[in-house]
Image (cartoon, rainbow, N blue to C red):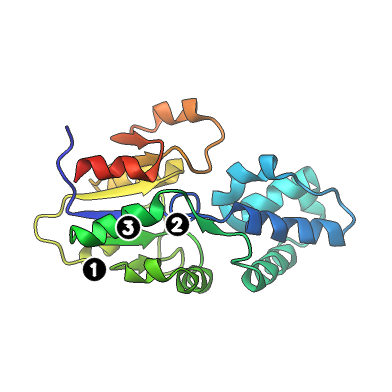
Amino acid sequence: MLKKPNAILFDLDGTLLDTARDLGNALNQILMGLERPNVAYDVYRNIASDGAKGMLELGFGEDLKNYDFASLRQQFLDYYENNICVETKYFMGVESLLLALNHHNIPWGIVTNKPEFLTLQLVTSFPLLQKCGVIISGDTLSERKPHPLPLLHAEAKLDLVSPNTWYVGDAERDIQAANSANMHSVIAQYGYISDIQQTNGWNADLSIHSPSELLDYF
């Protein structure tokens, strides 16, 4: 039985927020402008955690090398920034989980690879997320996940006594970062994972099928 956490850190896309449709819409907007076929939700959903680069690679495939990647990426980010919260929502159970953490005075924070300007824009759109104790984005530090530095920096910011921190994420890099930081690693299986079976090799401490499962531990 895992010991009760005294802090929990979360990934953002695919863990706290379901951002896939807005990211997919940004990709399809670019594809449509270039008269290329759109990508269906069922295809791009599990790539959403990989950000602009992953989405563009999915949409353009081998043809990506024939385009100015920097220009495409900027177009993607510009459209996404202006339409960042059209269809984005909490995953079911996230609000109840965060409210329970607040009720039990368990500090929590966000560690994401998303650029800070997009992270903060999303957080301001969801008031409950503004209650978090720390936010570390992909460009906050010199390293980002799977490097453990962002998680360790977030933990330090929470100023914990005898830390027993858990990190929850839906990508292998999340689990790698948590394990390297000597935190308890938790797979959010409800997130953007194309093949659940592949997570067996991630060496996580725990897997959850819904955010509410974390409530059992405190």
Distance Cα–Cα, label 3 vs label 1? 19 Å
Q: SS for tag 3?
A: helix
Left or right of 169: which side holds 78?
right
Q: SS for tag 2?
A: loop
Q: Residues within 10 Å of mark 1 (few under 14, many from 20)?
A: some
Which numbered disc, 3 or 2, marks the residue that appears first in the sequence?
A: 2
Q: Position of residue 48 (x, y in %)?
A: 59, 50
Residue at image mark 1: 157
Which numbered disc, 1 or 2, marks the residue that appears first in the sequence?
A: 2
Distance Cα–Cα, label 1 vs label 2? 18 Å
User: Which residue is rendered at x = 38% and y = 57% of the image?
Assistant: 95
- Residue placed most toward the observer, 68 or 6: 6
Q: Residues within 10 Å of mark 2 (few under 14, many from 20)?
A: many
Residue 158 seen in render: yes
Q: Position of residue 116 (x, y in %)?
A: 48, 71
Left or right of 183: which side holds 193?
right
Q: Amino acid at mark 1?
A: Lys
User: Which residue is rendered at x = 41% and y = 71% of the image?
Assistant: 127
- Quarter-of-image position of residue 10: bottom left
Q: Position of residue 165 (x, y in %)?
A: 22, 51
Q: Amino acid at mark 2?
A: Leu
Which numbered disc, 3 or 1, marks the residue that appears first in the sequence?
A: 3
Residue at image mark 2: 12
Instruction: Determine whether label 3 and label 2 are within 8 Å by CB.
Output: no
Residue 98: assigned label: 3
Q: Amino acid at mark 3?
A: Leu
- Quarter-of-image position of residue 163: bottom left
Q: Is residue 58 above or below residue 77?
A: above
Q: Residues within 10 Å of mark 3 (few under 14, many from 20)?
A: many
Left or right of 207: which side holds 107?
left
Q: SS for tag 1?
A: helix
